[in-house]
Image: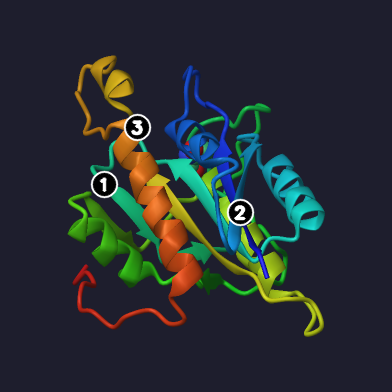
């Protein structure tokens, strides 16, 4: 049976003109193989609204796998997120002018959820292909973590007669043109490399049953 993979990316935020997460996932929209098809959707960078759009897309597309993707400006690599936490704590305004502080995403929900993607297998495969990648222990407390938590909360709350959804979140760096605009010259990655990395992540999510056990945690 054909599996549907939903990839989401975000609209630009914080005054930017472009968001590499959307540029990358839209390039993979319509990619398919004998047993899978990829659909890309854009999410607004808005607390609440992003999760409504995500859940609408899940309802409409009935994906088997969901990988949400966001920009993490300043990070040097493709970071595969391990954990979503139940808090919104924004240091900047979202695209609707909201700035929640220390607010629960799901009142009474668990403190955190783990990604169900094979995160270490993805990181290893990316590195084997020469792409910079690491496991990240925090997706922050802005709209990306909000979507990651909302996604995992939805997936965890599905009933037993609904098909399971494998899901997680990946952060990508600035594009070179975004970095060049900033005085601090943050790290960046070419769009083609980001697209390649996401393609590998989709392949691994489709093929791997369990994650690999490979040391690589942080000591602090
Ligand atoms: N990055 C932001 C939100 C949207 C995006 O692409 C974040 O990391 O929260």
Picture layout, residue 64 above or below residue 75: below
Total numbered badges shown on the rendered structure: 3
The residue sitting at the front extreme is 34
Circles 2 and 1: CB atoms closer than 8 Å: no
Q: Which residue is mark 1?
A: 77
Could one spot residue 87 in this view of the protein?
no
Q: Which mark is residue 167?
A: none
Q: Does residue 28 sit above or below 92 in this rendering?
A: below
Spatial CA span between label 1 and label 3:
12 Å
Residue position for label 2: 37
- Image height of 207 relative to 26, above or below: below
Q: Position of residue 5 (x, y in %)?
A: 60, 57
Q: Neighbour class for label 3 at 10 Å: few (<14), some, many (≥20)?
A: some
Q: On the image, numbered disc 3 is attached to which residue? A: 191
Q: Earlier in the sequence, mark 1 or mark 3?
A: 1
Q: Are marks 1 and 3 in contact (CB under 8 Å)?
A: no
Mark 2 / mark 1, whichever is N-terminal: 2
Question: Dot 1 surroundings within 10 Å: few (below 14), some, or many (20 or more)?
Answer: many
| Quarter assignment of residue 49 | top right
| 178 left or right of 25 in image | left
**3D distance between C-alphas at marks 2 and 1:** 26 Å
Q: Residue at x 20, y 58 (%)?
A: 127
């Amino acid at each position: 049976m054909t599996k549907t993979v939903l990839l989401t990316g975000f609209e630009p935020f914080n005054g930017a003109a472009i968001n590499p997460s959307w540029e990358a996932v839209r390039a993979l929209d319509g990619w398919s193989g004998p047993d899978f098809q990829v659909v890309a959707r854009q999410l607004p960078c808005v607390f609440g609204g992003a999760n409504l759009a995500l859940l609408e897309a899940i309802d409409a597309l009935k994906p088997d796998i969901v990988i949400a993707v966001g920009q993490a400006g300043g990070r040097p690599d493709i970071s595969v997120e391990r954990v979503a936490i139940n808090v919104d704590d924004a240091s900047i305004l979202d695209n609707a002018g909201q700035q929640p502080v220390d607010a629960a995403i799901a009142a009474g929900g668990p403190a955190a959820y783990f990604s169900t993607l094979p995160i270490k297998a993805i990181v290893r495969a990316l590195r084997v292909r020469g792409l910079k990648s690491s496991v990240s222990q925090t997706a922050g407390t802005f709209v990306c973590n909000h979507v990651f938590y909302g996604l995992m909360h939805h997936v965890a709350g599905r009933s037993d007669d609904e098909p399971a959804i494998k899901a997680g979140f990946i952060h990508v760096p600035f594009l070179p043109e975004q970095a060049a605009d900033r005085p601090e010259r943050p790290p960046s990655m070419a769009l083609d490399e980001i697209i390649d990395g996401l393609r590998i992540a989709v392949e691994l999510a489709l093929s791997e049953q369990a994650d690999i056990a490979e040391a690589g945690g942080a000591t602090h």
